Amino acid sequence: MSQNKNLQFDSKCIHSGISEYEFGPVVPPIYQTSTFKFESAEHGASLFKGEAEGYIYTRMKNPTIEAMENAVAELEGGHKALGCASGMAAISTVLITLLKAGDHVVCSKSVYGPTMTLIHSVLSKFNIGAAFVDSDITEEIEKAIKPNTKLIYIETPANPMISITDLEAAANLAHKNNALLVVDNTFMSPALQQPFKFGVDIVLHSMTKFLNGHADVVAGIIVTREEEMYLMMRKVLNQLGGVIDPFNSFLVHRGLKTLSVRMQRHCENAQLIAEYLENHSNVKWVRYPGLKNHPNYQVGLKQHSGHGGMISFELKGGFKAGETVMNNVKLCQLAVSLGGVETLIQHPASMTHLSMGAEARKSAGITEGLVRLSVGIENVKDIIEDLEQAFEKVKEKETAKV
Ligand SMILES: *Cc1c(COP(=O)(O)O)cnc(C)c1O
């Protein structure tokens, strides 16, 4: 692993986490086994005592999983990583490890929905308090900190407004108040943003998204900066049981090899599409970190090296226009999730947030014409052409009405 230290990031994507295996395979084999044989009673005993290096049981440690974990830890510039069964398994493991009854969390308001529900409805059962704030305004984080705040939890950029939180400012605030800063780095991936460089304590991901990148795996990962935290997390993960399996680890490790080139294309495509949308008569506004009108554009420049593949925009014509676009796109796939090679499109008001009702959507900032685009790595001309013909349908409908 260590001979990769001096490599450039894109070379690390290809060579990280690879060690020597029997027969000299170029990629780590899939050790699809739940358990490992001991050579003798003494060998078993020394493994359990931690005196011998080796494997006991896949929930605890497995060579295929370990290879992928080493790769992600190296790409994030962290110490060690823990592969989890999903992004939510990573998030719940981190929160349960770090918090106890009586503690308080300050969490970004625009955090991933199930993360908010976990903190709000599950952790509250264990007397863990929480404040949800507009973390893109650093003062709002500061105002919410209480004497028992042990953790600040943010995502940047985050849905639905692709809002950006200043990582360095948030880390300084956390440490000044004896709290830890946890960052969900799913939207950027280490190819574009490495939160440890800004003093963040724990980085986690839904690897379901950009890290795997091919929409065929659900997985998560926790990356720590030092051994003590790693061991603490490993113990709790082993007890909670939300570990990744060897086959999914293999797929993610394969996906990592193209992370750098994929992210480059996601960024190029998204920038062109954001500019196209910004100049479109059907579109009220566009939110993308690469547009100068993004409220935290300067903060973004400081902490990420590319603007990512996620765009939000508001259609003129509200709910109906949103439905029409959804029903007429052909190349863009109607689906939740993000970060895969294929472009995905989603209209929260008629899909993920339909059951909330219009009033609740309004107070949550989900406008009726809001569209979320996870820009894929197709040829950008094809994506724009697809959006254009769907926008034309909105215009046709409007003209028909008059
Ligand atoms: C998808 C997602 C998650 C949850 O990940 P799963 O793999 O679906 O459990 C967490 N955070 C962000 C930002 C996500 O996009």
Image: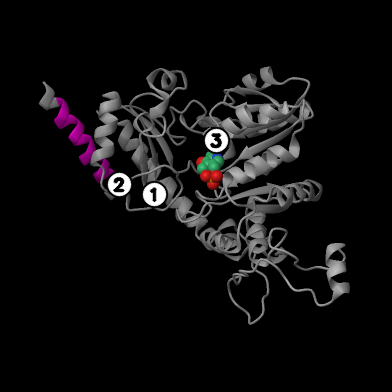
**Quadrant into which the C terminus falls:** top left
Q: Earlier in the sequence, mark 2 or mark 1?
A: 1
Q: Earlier in the sequence, mark 2 or mark 3?
A: 3
Q: Which residue is at the front of the view, 222 or 120?
A: 120
205 within the magenta span: no
Q: Amino acid at mark 3?
A: Pro
Which residue does the image show at 71% across and 27% down from the upper left?
A: 128
- The residue under the point 65% across, 57% down is 69
Q: Which residue is mark 3?
A: 114
Name the residue beneath numbered marker 2.
383
In contact (CB < 8 Å): disc 2 and disc 1: yes
Query: Between marks 2 and 3, how big is the CA–CA gap?
Result: 30 Å
Q: Is residue 72 above or below residue 116?
A: below
The quarter of the rendered structure image containing the N terminus is bottom right
Question: Ligand 1 near label 3 (Cβ, under 8 Å)?
Answer: yes
Point out the frontmost of discs 1 and 3. 3
Determine whether 241 is above or below 56 in the image: above
Q: Within 8 Å: ligand 1 and the Cβ of disc 2?
A: no
State the CA–CA distance, disc 1 to disc 3.
24 Å
- Closer to us: 177 or 330: 330
Q: Nearer the viewer, residue 216 or 264?
A: 216
* Label 3, residues with CA under 10 Å away: few <14, some 14-19, many ≥20: few
Classify mark 1: helix, strand or loop: loop
Q: Determine which residue is flagged by label 1.
A: 376
The three-letter amino acid code for the residue at tag 2 is Ile
Residue situated furthest bottom in the rendering: 23
